[in-house]
Image (tube, rainbow, N blue to C red):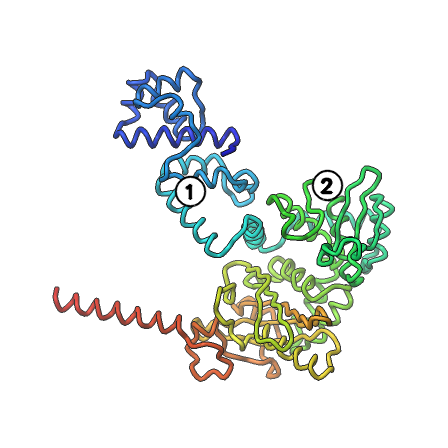
Amino acid sequence: MILNNDNVKLVFGLKLKQLRLDQKLSLSEVSQKSGLSISYINEIEKGKKYPKSDKILALASALNVDYDTLVSLKLSKRLEPISVLLSSNILTELPLDLFGIDQSNLLEMLSDAPTKVSAFIGTLIEIARNYNMSVEQFYFSALRTYQEMHDNYFEEIENAAEKYLSEKSVGETQVLDEKYLADVLRKDYHYSIEIMNEATNPELKAVRSLLIPRAEGNKLLINSQLSDIQRSFVYGREIGYQYLKLKNRLYTTALVEADSFEQLLNNFKASYFASAIIIRRNLLIPQLKEFLALKTWQPDRLLDMIRHFNTTPESFCYRISNILPRHFGINQMFFLRFNNFAGQNQFDLTKEMHIARKHIPHTVKDEYYCRRWVSLTILQDLAEQIKAKSYQGTLCKGQISRYVDSQEEYLMISFGKLMSTTQNLSVSVSMGIFLNDEAQKTIAFLNDPNLTHRDVNETCERCQLFDCKERMAAPIVLQRKHKNEELKKSISRMLEREG
């Protein structure tokens, strides 16, 4: 087990405390036997100090163990999960301060209740293994949590983007395009931009871009299948890396490349910067105000905005999720992306983000998502268009979804488009806005009769709508819940009778 100095101190402290408690010795008793002060031993047990050799000998003698046992990095079986945690990269690579966690306090907590914390960590590790969760997925989950903590809005990056546009003398109404962004990379940052040779490197077929760092100027390789909109975003992200001076970075956005949280965080910052200079805050806010003030639901206005900013539905939805909480007071919302192959009744939730709280829906393993969601029905509509050879471009649909269990209502806005003509792969991206008082005051078209209203639920397995024509599975989770509730009531009645 390879540990840094702080973790070596912690391991020694954990072992010392465990040996002392196993022998039912107080700090005072170990102090008397070793000749070391109580405060010094307490600091050691908390992982704050590592004693010199003569003091280790004194502690070993006081605890009736040999020197090598005490200094060994091997922890007991009870503390093995903590050992796994310490030998991983998680504690050292996650900037805990971003989450309001002081690392010294975390280490102190580990040393104060090592057995309980060990059991808790062991549970988390077991859950991660059961869901085949990799370290990279853990980093992505941590990044998503970081975004959600800040309502997905980062003023310092917004300000940096506006400062950059001002320094470049970009016009107040100018929308940056692929040519402008590529020219900036070449002239200001000495990039060379080339198309990937997929015949030479077929393994890079799924990679959108690859940066090759060079002293004389970076080389940026671009996938030949990217659209001009996608290339614009790649160029904007590279400008973000350079302008924000983010050194520890990903060279592609492939999941397998990420080996630290800082790399993912920097990639997020550079991507946020790209969105902020392409979909400019000062241009988006007035257009959103006009749209939200409409008395009728007009999806074409949203599609027009996407075309105006020369962006994709996904980037547009993400950018709106930056703006709505801070500038419109709409801060209870979520984002979803689903993939579907036309003709197949399988829908994969590939991305999600929740702001203010965990909303429904969210990822559920091995259950059927509600087929009444507009996120899925829009993909079914796309499949019909593809089958009829009438597909003409991105669809946009709206729906007010009422969850039958909680009675909570959400305005759902979904975009659907065909991503791959060869595989018939379609994607939907959706925003869900919780219709609390603030949202209902801000969004004027909610009473438009042309806006579809539907009762929905999370999954078929949890749903009480027994006459649902779209049902894909029996409500086994709901039935199990009811069975358990009846058992509890029966036990309670029996206890009352016999008591």
Residue 282 visible in the shown view? no
Quadrant assignment for the C terminus? bottom left
Q: Helix or strand or loop: what does disc 2 sit on? A: loop
Label 2: how many Cα within 10 Å (few below 14, some 14–19, many 20+): few
| Residue position for label 1 | 81
Q: Amino acid at mark 2?
A: Lys
Image point (75%, 61%), residue name: 283
Label 1: how many Cα within 10 Å (few below 14, some 14–19, many 20+): many
* 472 shown above or below 163: below
Instruction: Give the camera-side residue of 128 and 313.
Output: 128
The location of residue 333, given as percent across then percent down, is: 56, 64
The answer to whether the residue labelled 2 contacts the one labelled 1, judged by CB atoms less than 8 Å apart, is no
Image point (40%, 26%), residue name: 43
Which label is found at residue 283? none
Residue 443 visible in the shown view? yes
Q: Quadrant of residue 109?
A: top left
Q: Quadrant of residue 228?
A: bottom right
* Sequence-wise first label, 2 or 1: 1
Q: Nearer the viewer, mark 2 or mark 1?
A: 1
Which label is found at residue 245? 2
